[in-house]
Image (cartoon, coloured by chain):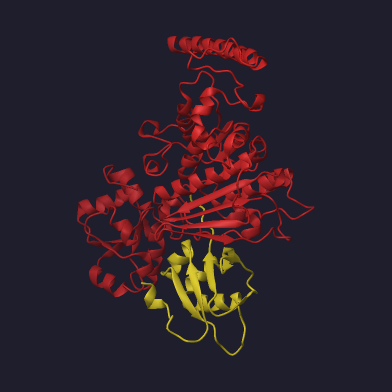
Chain colours: A red, B yellow
Amino acid sequence: MDLAREVQQLRLEKAKLEAELQSFRESASSATVSESCSLRDPTFCPATWLSGGQHYLDREMINRYSRQLLVPAFGVQGQLNLLKSSILVVGAGGLGSSAALYLAAAGIGCLGIVDHDNVELNNLHRQIIHSESSIGNSKVNSAATACNALFCYRINSMLKVVKHEVQLTANNSVDLINQYDVIVDATDNVPTRYLISDTCVALGKPLVSGAALGMDGQLTVYNFNGGPCYRCLFPVPPPQGACQRCSDSGVLGVVPGIIGAFQALEAIKIASGVGDPLSKRMLILDGFSTSIRVVKLRNRNPDCSVCRDGSQITEREIQELNYESFTGSSLSDKSPKPLSVLPDSQRITAKEYFDYLKEGHPHLLLDVREAHQYAISALPCSLNVPLAKLEDRLPEIKAAAQESQIIVLCRRGNDSQLAVKYLRENGKTEAVDIIGGLESWARDVDPRFPIY
Amino acid sequence: MDAEFSQTEGTCGRVKVLFFARAREIAGVSETSLGIDGAESSKTIKDCIDLLTKQFPGLEEIMSCIVVALNQEYADQSSLVKSGDELALIPPISGG
């Protein structure tokens, strides 16, 4: 309660100081060189200094942004344009971390951040805007705190950070995106990419789209200056499984950082009106060999179902679309829905497997994950044969199992079902799998088992 | 590892093929070289893709959503290729 009162008190003081500052500013700008300008006060300077009142960078702004004011192509006008701009970063993950921090630091006027997730430990290797102290808290709050920290000694921050702690959906995308000048797609899934692109077409907003996976990155500016939209390039969504998730395929932390920084660059260029944005081109980063290619893209597809002239998608049509069923995947990069291939009679729980172990039940534990996943953590005495190698190595598996039962295990209990099906079709009719895989084992039997 | 698959020694017309992201994972190599000589004098990107999916059957699953660039420019499947051209297969990636 005391804390609440203190916060209230500080708010009142802040409002008072802001009002004072505003009146100082007003009196300062009305005079050529205001008497009330106190150069002894380091936090305050009159709004107009130079260029016959043409620009409105105060002393601190000039100092803060001096190194980019010195870039001839950018200069004062670029900075002033930027200060007036509002940019929405959708996703406060690996791409959003570096994009949002650079945008906040560069001096945009308003930064919106959309995310509905909480910070997890396995985010921190790439989502550098968050820290250990934010684990379990909302990403939007954590990201906003980091961006505001760049201005923590300012009485009146030059940056307005707007937190949107929601999942972007067909119902809210128009309202959210409409509030901003430039949109940065820093999301991690296919349906949201289509949703953002469609909404940007409907509202005529430039879209800076980035993506990263493994050691690969991609970057394009869509729906800008007659360039294509996402659907012009990818009218057909990738089949399930063809567009992988970071949580399955992994991502080297710095790769989204690089692409996110590129996204900030493109957004800054569009917002400031400086340079040649990456429209009608796609940058492809191959982090493995450190090569960057820029591929010239097609113009807008005259037959595009979304952006073709005269019949662009409408706000109402977006709300009526089901992006998840269109793409066959979920609006978040969470674990895939569990497969249901086997009947219950061909499956056991992690606890039941633990009982087998205690009873000394003879069996072969077959772990069908890829070898690099098996190397992360595995149960003792298991044989690793990746699902894709099952057919080739069947004789080896049969020799190892002899007459005993084969119990199949994987990370989440999906591949293990496919493996059991195959084994049963090929003579090992007793084979069963462990429901929920190693994740269940860690949850229900051995909490010390490292999961990833 | 590229050498196993590439057949760059030939004297006939060849196209260099670059695989990106998932396409590279499926092919198991980052590039290969495709012989384009045959009965017909002209070959299209579609012909090249047919040859590639024969060599790397897994590519089939992503072909519907792939961007193909010919000499670093977006190209339709009906575009003609000639010896010395570079073809890039670019599937979308969506992680972030």
Number of callouts: 0
Question: Visible in this render: residue A116?
Answer: no
Closest to the observer, A4 or A424: A4
Give x and y (percent) for residue B65.
Answer: 58, 63
Instruction: Residue A52: name its quadrant.
Output: top right
Kindly identify the residue that appears in the image at 58 percent across and 79 percent down: B82
Q: Is residue A24 above or below residue A274?
A: above
Q: Quick check: A91 left or right of B41?
A: left
Return the residue found at the far right: A310
Residue B28, position in %: x, y?
41, 69
In the displayed structure image, the side of residue A177 where residue A372 appears, left or right: left
Give the quadrant of the N terminus of chain A.
Answer: top left
Q: Residue at x 29, y 75 (%)?
A: A395
Q: Is residue B71 left or right of residue A411?
A: right
**x and y, in percent, of residue A357 in the image:** 22, 53
- Foreground residue, B67 or A16? A16
* Residue A386 at least partly seen: yes
Q: Position of residue B85 (x, y in %)?
A: 55, 75
Residue at 62% in and 40% down? A271
Foreground of the two, A423 or A308: A308
Q: Is residue A152 above or below residue A170?
A: above
